[in-house]
Amino acid sequence: SSDLTRPNANDIALSLSLPVFENLTTRDLIKIREDERPDFEAFRSELRKKINEELVAAKDGAPARVIARNIDENYLHPGLANIERKIRNSRQAVTKKTALDLTIAATGVGIGLIHTLPLMIAGGITALSGGIPIKSALDSYIEDKRSIKEDSLYFLWQVEQRARH
């Protein structure tokens, strides 16, 4: 569409800058789309909604590339950064919690070995009880991953990850 006519949703979609797709072959993209169909459908649906919202909010005469840039800057980039932040924070929390719990458990076992058999048993119990917080951290990590997978941009994030590797 020319800059003098009001763009439609297709014009805006074609004007979006999605560099995550640049390094993928068409075959790879189709395979990812098929493999991740529910995530793709959620992404496509939410992207259509954002395009339509931006169309309604756009000033008369706004070219498709300007509307697309708004979607990119206000939805796509922040959304992908948010997913990346959530994943990084979740991984860090599990790593820290696991390291702390293993240190506490190892200390309990070490104390038990230094003293007598009854204390060794107590140390073993301490080590085992240290596993409960690890389970809690892992459960939290799994729940975080589940909520991340429900994000409408999860498909795009997956494509980005596959394109990097």
Image (cartoon, grey):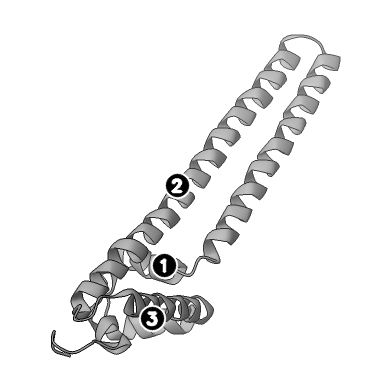
Label disc, if present, on residue 52 of the rendered structure? 3
Q: Position of residue 145 (x, y in %)?
A: 56, 57
Query: Badge 2 local density, few (<14 within 10 Å), some, or many (20+)?
Result: few
Label 2 amino acid?
A: Arg
Judging by the rendered image, the residue that carries numbered circle 2 is 88
Residue 162 pos. (x, y %): 36, 67
Quadrant of the rendered image containing residue 53: bottom left
Give the x, y percent position of residue 40.
46, 79
Location of residue 25 by image quarter: bottom left
Q: Residue at x 55, y 66 (%)?
A: 150
Q: Which residue lies under the disc numbered 1?
A: 158
- Residue 46, image quadrant: bottom left
Helix, strand or loop at mark 1:
helix
- Extreme residue in the right direction: 118
For the N terminus, which image quadrant?
Answer: bottom left
Q: Which numbered disc, 3 or 1, marks the residue closer to the eye? A: 3
Instruction: Find numbered disc 2 in the image and state the secondary structure of the residue it sits on.
Output: helix
| Disc on the earlier residue, 3 or 2 | 3
Determine whether, in the image, residue 150 is placed left or right of residue 131: left
Asked if residue 41 lies left or right of residue 77, the reply is: right
- Residue 165 visible, this orientation: no
How far is the residue under mark 2 from the one under mark 1? 15 Å
**Foreground label between 3 and 2:** 3
Marks 3 and 1, how far apart at CA: 24 Å
x and y, in percent, of residue 106 in the image: 65, 24
